[in-house]
Image: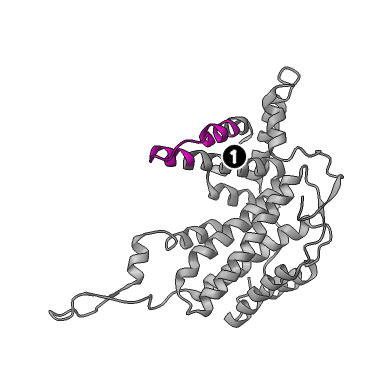
Amino acid sequence: MTVPEPDVVCARLDELVELWREDPYGSVDMKRRGMDSIGLTIYGLAAHAHALAAAVRVLDKAGGEPTMVPLVRQILECAVTAAWVEKYGQRAVLAVVHDDARGRVNTFKQFVESGTPDDGSVAEWQAALDLLDPDRSRSSEHFEQRCAEIEGLGGTYAMYRALSGISHASGMVSEMYLRQVDQPTKDQPGVVLARGPEEWARDAVLGTALTYLLLAAAAWDRVDGQHRSRSRLKQIASEIGVRLAWQESAVGLRRQHEWERARRRRRSPQSSGSPGSRQVVASTGGASADPRDRRAVGPSD
């Protein structure tokens, strides 16, 4: 990867955000990857990554404080998940839906336990979770496993962990606002308070944001049948030495085959017609599995 100058990184981040904002909200001829929800999940993740990038630039222009780090971490997470959904289709999108349902169940339970009246949401989302459970992907349990399922993302999880260190209430966060005194005295103790970090890896963080924003944008561009931004995305990727095409890893292909075998067993003649299998498909879009099928999807769909 070529390390561009910081002003080039900032200019390309701004350009990608503007490209996304200027893209017309007309009908999108979406390449079907088995069902609509796959493409729509990728779109949502890519859209959020661009919104986060815009916020990163606002924070950077306001002073370059590392408050942007949690946003960059989420750009990375959205981009990798978008690429993962693109590569593994139904298995991945069902895992994302499962995670969402599980999170909602746990959230509603916490509100009810704290005294909020139960309006039936817990039972409703628990029922959805129970239907999705047979189709869950174990890869959804750990972001590290998602990274491992895409060839060439070996350093991604390490970067994710590095960004996580100051994305939560942690000792690392506290240390940014402290200064160690080399020769403490009675009047000046060994540690003094500060208003912000003395040094931090601004250029590396912004470079990470650009790299993974490109990955998210490219994942959506491959789903968008018109490929409106493909040429420019390739030019920027070439300029900074980032590849936009990712492949499934051996680990990911093995897990995919295991999931497909388990799914076929559940749909064998002995288990066909079960209400669970029909409802799971309905809950995730109910689309035809024919990849040749194409549909114009607009903002009202």
Q: Residue at x 66, y 49 (%)?
A: 249
Q: Residue at x 46, y 62 (%)?
A: 162
Residue 69 or residue 110, whichever sits in front: 110
Rendering coords of residue 290 (x, y %): 84, 40
Rendering coords of residue 8 (x, y %): 63, 80
Q: Does 109 lie within the magenta span?
A: yes
Rendering coords of residue 120 (x, y %): 53, 33
Q: Which residue is mark 1?
A: 98
- Compared to residue 251, the image places residue 68 above or below, namely below
Q: Main secondary structure of the magenta part?
A: helix
Q: Residue at x 50, y 79 (%)?
A: 62
- Compared to residue 281, the image places residue 6 above or below, namely below
Rendering coords of residue 240 (x, y %): 66, 74
Q: Amino acid at mark 1?
A: His
Indicate the quadrant where residue 288 lies: top right
- SS at badge 1: helix
Q: Does 190 lie within the magenta span?
A: no
Magenta-highlighted residues:
108-128
- Compared to residue 254, the image places residue 157 above or below, namely below
